[in-house]
Amino acid sequence: MKRVDMSPSAIARRLKQMEQLRRLSLSLMKAKAIGEEEALELRRSFRERKRNEAAENAAH
């Protein structure tokens, strides 16, 4: 049988992973299906926002 690491750091890592999975699960429960047009618009706005952020960071 495989031994389970029960050190404090290993336990903390597993707890952090569980919290991340919990948040993902809650987000997925709230998610809704979107149409192709809405998906395209979201991708466009995301790319534009990233370009703007990159331009702002380059200006500083």
Image (tube, rainbow, N blue to C red):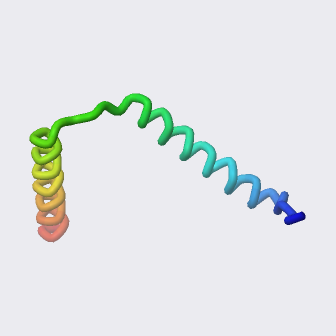
Q: Nearer the viewer, residue 48 or 59?
A: 48
In the figure, residue 30 lies in which quadrant?
Answer: top left
Name the residue at 27% across, 34% down. Answer: 33
Residue 10 appears left or right of 6? left
Which residue occupies the extreme bottom position in the image? 58
Q: Position of residue 49 (x, y in %)?
A: 15, 53
Quarter holding the N terminus is bottom right
Q: Which quadrant of the figure has residue 53?
A: bottom left
Q: Is residue 58 above or below residue 13?
A: below
Q: Residue at x 75, y 60 (%)?
A: 9
Tell me: 32 left or right of 51: right
Residue found at x 68% / y 48%: 15
Establish if 60 lies above or below 38.
Answer: below
Q: Which image quarter: residue 31?
A: top left
Specify the quadrant that holds the C terminus. Answer: bottom left
Residue 21: x %, y % from top left: 55, 45
- Count of numbered marks: 0
Residue at x 13%, y 61% (from the top left corner): 51
Indicate the position of residue 5 as horizontal and vertical percent values.
82, 62
* Identity of the residue furthest to the right in this view: 1
Would residue 51 be found to the left or right of residue 14 on screen? left
Tell me residue 40's x, y (percent): 12, 47
